[in-house]
Image (cartoon, grey):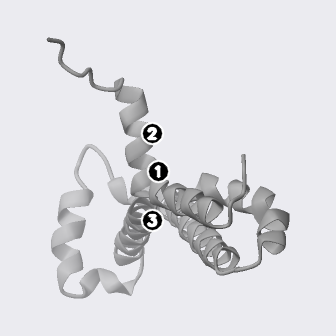
Amino acid sequence: MSTPEKAPLGQRFRHGMKMYRAWISIFVLAVGVLLTVLAAGFFTPLSTVAPFPAINAATNTASANYNLVFVIVGPIISIVGGYMVAAYSIARRRFEHLMLTKSKAEFLRNIPEIEDLLWDLTPYDEVRYDHKRAELRVRR
């Protein structure tokens, strides 16, 4: 009796990244915004307001000033996170619109665009697409 083998780590990682794409993009955006706020809290008059003096004491040590890194990295991560959130949201909205069709001819015209959108969406959406193909009796 053999036990089922686990998928390789890389394959499981890619599946997880695709499955939780929306949450990951929101997390990346939130981290970028947090780092930007921490940088602003050090270099602006906000440095005297409540949580920032304690945070600044921890991030501005004698050996390194991490706030300088936050100034550079924070906006970059915010931009990347914003792009990820926007790309997912646009793909989700367009996919939902294309899946509403009841016409087989219209669905056939939209298959290339739907399959292109599936690269930005979750495996659940691929299953929905397969069910829609079966419902409209469209062959591969």
Q: Earlier in the sequence, mark 3 or mark 2?
A: 2
Distance, label 2 to label 1, CA atoms, is 6 Å
Q: Amino acid at mark 3?
A: Ala
Identify the residue under disc 3.
Answer: 22
In the rendered image, the vertical position of residue 33 relative to residue 122, given as above or below: below
- The answer to whether marks 1 and 3 mark residues whose Cβ atoms lie closer than 8 Å is no
94 and 112: which one is in front? 112
Q: Amino acid at mark 2?
A: Arg
Residue at x 55% of width, y 61% of height = 131
Which element is circle 2 on?
Answer: helix
Residue at x 20% of width, y 75% of height = 53
Identify the residue under disc 2.
Answer: 14
Q: Is residue 118 left or right of residue 69?
A: right
Q: Amino acid at mark 1?
A: Lys
Which element is circle 3 on?
Answer: helix
**Residue neighbourhood size for the residue with mark 3, other residues' Cα within 10 Å, grouped as few (<14), some (14–19), many (≥20):** many
Identify the residue under disc 1.
Answer: 18
**Residue neighbourhood size for the residue with mark 1, other residues' Cα within 10 Å, grouped as few (<14), some (14–19), many (≥20):** some
Position in image of residue 101 (x %, y %): 70, 79
